[in-house]
Image: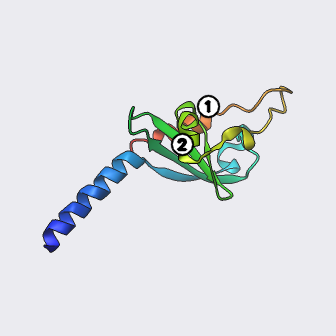
Amino acid sequence: MKTIFGGSLFFLLLAFGAARGGTIQVTEKDFEERWPFTVHGGTLSCVKAEDTGAGMITLTADGNIYAVNGPAAEQAEAKGWRPIAEIWKGNPNSPGTKMNLGPVIVKGLSLCNK
């Protein structure tokens, strides 16, 4: 019985890991002047969408999970994630625009295969 349970647990963890992706701690120091958020840091994650397999990039900061990219924003309401606009910093070099999320999204997508 122990072997069956152990094998089932292994496959459950394997399936969860494949759907989950990876995580990494990030801070404004990592991105310097390119840091696009009003929070100073958080946990960047990739969660793979069950239906499409798309990488949904999230940032967990101050107890909230924020949807960073398009696929995450599409699922935000269903998952209880907050909109990134709440912490998206304005671009000081171009008033009326926001900072580029690209570098953070690229970093997040690199976690999708971990």
Left or right of 89? Residue 54 is left
The mark found on residue 78 in the picture is 2
| Residue type marked 1 | Gly
Q: Residue at x 69, y 50 (%)?
A: 29
| Label 2 neighbour load within 10 Å: few <14, some 14-19, many 20+ | few
Q: Nearer the viewer, residue 56 or 22?
A: 56
Q: Nearer the viewer, mark 1 or mark 2?
A: 2
Q: Position of residue 101 (x, y in %)?
A: 65, 34
Would you say 8 lies left or right of 81 here? Answer: left
The relative height of residue 86 versus residue 42 in the rendered view (above or below) is: above
Position of the N terminus by quadrant:
bottom left
Q: Name the image quarter holding residue 32.
A: top right
> Which amino acid is tagged 2?
Ala
Among the 4 quarters of the image, the one containing residue 103: top right
Q: Are marks 1 and 2 in contact (CB under 8 Å)?
A: no
Along the polypeptide, which appears first: circle 1 or circle 2? 2
Q: Give the CA distance from mark 1 to mark 2.
A: 24 Å
Q: Residue furthest front?
A: 78
Residue pictured at 54% horizontal, 42% vertical = 78
The residue sitting at 38% across, 34% down in the picture is: 51
Name the residue at 80% across, 32% down.
91
Q: Which mark is residue 102?
A: 1
Residue 105, image x and y in percent? 57, 36
Say the numbered circle drawn on residue 30: none
Circle 2 sits in a helix, a strand or a loop, which is it? helix
Packing grade of label 1 (10 A; few <14, some 14-19, many >=20) is few
Image location of residue 13, percent across then percent down: 31, 58
Q: Could you tell me residue 89's position as x and y percent?
A: 77, 39
Residue 111 visible here = no
- Tag 1 secondary structure: helix
- Height in image: 102 above or below 29? above
